[in-house]
Amino acid sequence: MEILVFVGLLVLGFVASISFGIASTIGAVVSGDPLSRSKNRVIFGSFIAGLGQTYCFLAYIGYFVDWILNSTEGESTYRIIYLTIAFLVIQIQMGISLARSKDRAKVKPEMDYEAIIGGHPFTIIFCIIGFFLFVFNEGIWKELYWWWF
């Protein structure tokens, strides 16, 4: 069972890293051309990028937490260990996403990653809150992502 959980985590991590980039690209498009835009437009683009990233991260977190809670039903010791590992892995995934965005901004300066990088603090705060909401209130993520089922 443990191996299945970690293989699933790797597959979800790969799919999630692709979807995070797509979700945050919308904010970069909204912020406009880097040469001719206002500061308010960058802030608005960062907000939109943060919303997209948060929505994708929360889907990833919710699915993974629900999977752990269902697979370790009645086994409180394993549940605590798996949820701790899941929290650390999710934090690492968010850090990797931020590092990839910053690296892409250095490699491709003609592209606009300012809005994507600006949306990460918003994403990190709401995903930490969302993780604990999903752990302690198991049904809330099913209401947010009703189309998933």
Image: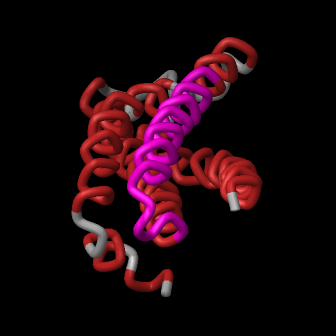
- The spot of residue 70 in percent (x, y) is 48, 72
Q: Residue at x 38, y 34 (%)?
A: 119
Relative to residue 89, is residue 73 depicted above or below?
below
Front position in the image: 132 or 105:
132
What are the residue bounds of the magenta stretch? 71-99
Front position in the image: 9 or 96:
9
Relative to residue 63, is residue 95 depicted above or below?
above
- The spot of residue 62 in percent (x, y) is 43, 61
- In the rendered structure, the answer to whether residue 56 lies left or right of residue 8 reads left
Q: Residue at x 51, y 57 (%)?
A: 60
Q: Please, which residue is most extreme toward the top here?
A: 106
**Residue 97 highlighted magenta (yes or no):** yes
Relative to residue 49, is residue 97 depicted above or below?
above
Q: Quadrant of the N terminus?
A: bottom right
Q: Residue at x 48, y 42 (%)?
A: 81
- The spot of residue 51 in percent (x, y) is 35, 50
Front position in the image: 139 or 127:
139
Quadrant of the rendered image containing residue 121: top left
Front position in the image: 88 or 148:
88
- The spot of residue 9 in percent (x, y) is 67, 52
Relative to residue 35, is residue 51 depicted above or below?
below
Chief secondary structure of the magenta portion: helix
Q: Residue at x 25, y 31 (%)?
A: 40
Q: Does residue 52 appear anywhere in the picture?
A: no
